Amino acid sequence: MAETVFPQGFLWGSATSSHQVEGNNTNNDWWAWEHAGRVKEPSGLACDQYRRFREDFDLAKSLHHNAHRFSIEWSRIEPREGEFDEVAIAHYREVIAALRERGLEPLVTLHHYTNPLWLSNQGGWTNPKVVEAFARFTQRVVEALGDQVQYWLTINEPMVYAVMHYLDGVGPPGERNNVRLFVRVVEHLLRAHALSSQVIHHVAKARGWDVRVSLANHAQPFPPCRPWWPIDRVAAGFAEHVYNQRFLKALVEGEWKFPGFPRVRIPEARGSLDFIGMNYYGRVFLRSSLFGSPWWGSRCSTRHHKNVTERNFLEWDVYPSGIRQILRWSVPYRLPVLITENGICTTDDAQRTRFILNHLRWVGRAIQEGAPVMGYLYWSLLDNFEWSYGYTPRFGLIEVDYSTQARRVRESGRRFAEVCRTNRLPEQT
Ligand code: GAL
């Protein structure tokens, strides 16, 4: 492929989330889950970024990033229902100031999987109260930080959140295949995003601030496990439609319908996206099944699948051209698209370099074909707590030695830095 030149003003950087990097988030449901022995190892001090953010942002700046996505920890800001912690709010003001001082555009996520304990004790996202609670939290945060933030992401990967916690049971509250709760949680996530987006726009308008709101939508192609078997093709097509498209469509059309459940009208969702945030990791192969997740069939292992030519450390599929596919899906929405996450865990850093450059080549191709891509954020700036897998998977552009908290920039981090600096990807040799 020829040299790729990215659009002017392209956002280049990386993404993290509070619970995965900050350390000592003792007041949320994930911490409780970890300490109930439900994960390989608890998050503990994580990357100690609550204290070391300046050092980490110095590194991001040295790697020529011009943007950084991070999340605000709800359980720190609102430790008890309705009580806001001014010290925690001041902390995040310092975080944002530190980013701005280094020329890094802050992109702020308001919810990245974790819930304050008081909320999870009331049923978390299954309780309709969560919608108002999230709006109140949003309002407090935006009033306090909004003069310094243009880009807001309300919720990280709503579909993954619902699948992971209510179908797969690998995060709190650990529900398995509970389709009834799953559907309810998705509805509340949609409503919460819509109301939160309204609150952000409302606060910003009253104060004359310019804001752009979205969420980070996880998208993945779903090829059938056995392409010759029509029922696998149906299961895969169904998942692709519901998982990748219906959630976004619901936000644009103001209506959500899950097969077998009543239609839900959410008119306030219309206009809640100013751009589309997309997280992309790879494909998931599906087979029809009576025993897997009941609504779309079950995943088949990528370990032996003959169409999988490359895998990451966790044996997930690596499929660079898929990023072009998901960017194509977003074209009909006529909104700018930001890659809010794309990354690989690997012990082979050369594989990470290839992963980044190959994905960027396909992003470049999608741009040439008309996809309005505004930026690319690699997951993640540094190795961090990978939820139920603990600390073994290494996603970082920067290596973390957890025994000393020392950071070391990887060669892949430097190769990515060259792209960020020049805003171009040299011709493939
Ligand atoms: C995303 C998630 C991140 C991170 C990443 C790597 O789905 O938003 O928190 O864990 O996957 O698995």
Image (cartoon, helix red, strand yellow):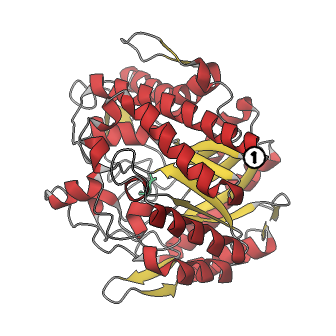
Residue 44, relative to residue 117: is it above or below? below
Q: Is residue 291 left or right of residue 256?
A: left
Q: Is residue 51 left or right of residue 119?
A: right
- Check disc 1 and report the residue beneath it: 207
Tag 1: amino acid: Arg
Give the image location of residue 229, x and y in percent.
Answer: 38, 25
| Corner quadrant of residue 346 | bottom left
Give the image location of residue 151, x and y in percent.
Answer: 67, 52
Q: Is residue 312 left or right of residue 353?
A: left
Give the image location of residue 366, x and y in percent.
Answer: 74, 47
Q: Is residue 167 visible?
A: no
Q: Bin the neighbour count of mark 1 within 10 Å (Cα to Cα): few under 14, some 14-19, many 20 and up.
A: few
Give the image location of residue 361, x and y in percent.
Answer: 70, 59
CB of mark 1 near ligand 1 (< 8 Å): no
Q: Quadrant of ligand 1?
A: bottom left
In front: 112, or 179?
Answer: 112
Q: Is residue 383 visible?
A: yes
Image point 29% across, 27% down: which residue? Answer: 181
Q: Quadrant of the C terminus?
A: bottom right
Helix, strand or loop under label 1: helix
Query: Going by the picture, which residue comes out furthest to the right?
Result: 8
